[in-house]
Amino acid sequence: MVEPFSQSFLIEGRNFLNAGKASTEIKSILKQLGVNAAFIRRVAIAAYEAEMNVVMYARKAKMTFQVTPQVIKILVNDEGPGIPDIERAMREGYSTATPEMREMGFGAGMGLPNIKRNSDDFTIESEVGKGTQLGITINIS
Amino acid sequence: MLLLSEIRELLSSEVYVGEEHLSETDIKFGCASDLMSDVLAFSRSGAVLLTGLVNVQTIQTAFIADISAVVFVRGKRPADDIISLAKEKRIPVLGTPYSMYEACGKLYAKGLTSTMEPAVSNGFQARI
Ligand SMILES: Nc1ncnc2c1ncn2[C@@H]1O[C@H](COP(=O)(O)OP(=O)(O)OP(=O)(O)O)[C@@H](O)[C@H]1O
Ligand SMILES: [Mg+2]
């Protein structure tokens, strides 16, 4: 049985030097907790896509990571521009990434669809001018 | 399936990280992209990633997606920060003088299959 665990991370927008650190740490923690590798991969992909979106589009965010014997949850609450049309943002291939971001390997417009695909339950809420909240749940039992 | 040491030979590769593990690393699939979200969508654990994107995010993406090795194409050399992250994450990193097209072709010809289903079997729709 997996031990309960929880931790929060602060993610800074525009800080490409630290981009991905929270998700790689989450992955390392899940390995230590002995979670099955296929679940870890799904959690890590969802967390990484969410983290990179904060780095690229928002000012900052709090990412909360919770593990229980039944589920892994990742909640991301950012302060930023928000998403005016969530349905469009969720579409594969839709991206507002700048040329600089594309040069770094982002902007496929696959991030949000990837998060949804790897989640058992996925929620997204956003308010323009305020920020965006993601709720990612992966069942592990 | 190919050993990473066979891939090194096939691609006339230079080895930047993981020299000592090449002959014990099985590679089950191949995938190639310069877009990291594509890699996260279409790769599988145990794949080799061929890419022209030479930065720290490439290694981080490989770690996140359980990629077994990274090959930088067209002779692009990784900087020190890339090499040290790959060492820390224990991800072998190779470089090949071949273009992405040639490098993929060489591995595909040796039977290394894609991480995606063949397009013809699912009506040209990317399988997700
Ligand atoms: N946290 C966020 N705040 C504001 N806008 C966002 C946020 N996350 C996503 N978006 C918007 O939704 C679009 C789609 O996001 P998604 O992650 O699917 O693709 P991308 O980030 O553009 O490219 P990729 O993830 O493939 O590198 C983004 O281009 C951006 O306009
Ligand atoms: Mg994204």
Image: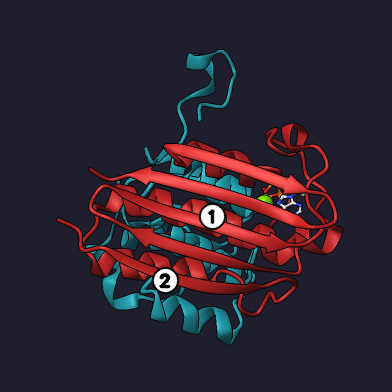
* Residues packed near mark 2 inside 10 Å, few (<14), some (14 to 19) or many (20 plus): few
Q: Are callouts 2 and 1 both on one chain? A: no
The subunit carrying tag 2 is A
Which chain identifier belongs to the red chain?
A
Is residue A125 shown left or right of residue A69? right
Q: Amino acid at mark 2?
A: Gln
Foreground of the two, A73 or A30: A73
Is residue B125 shown left or right of residue A72? right
Which chain identifier belongs to the cyan chain?
B
Residue position marked by numbered label 2 in the rendering: A7
Q: Nearer the viewer, mark 2 or mark 1?
A: 2
Quadrant for residue B87, please give it: bottom left
Residue B89 vertical position relative to residue B51 in the rendered view, above or below: below
Residue position marked by numbered label 1 in the rendering: B50
The secondary element bearing badge 2 is classed as strand
The answer to whether mark 2 and mark 1 are in CB contact below 8 A is no
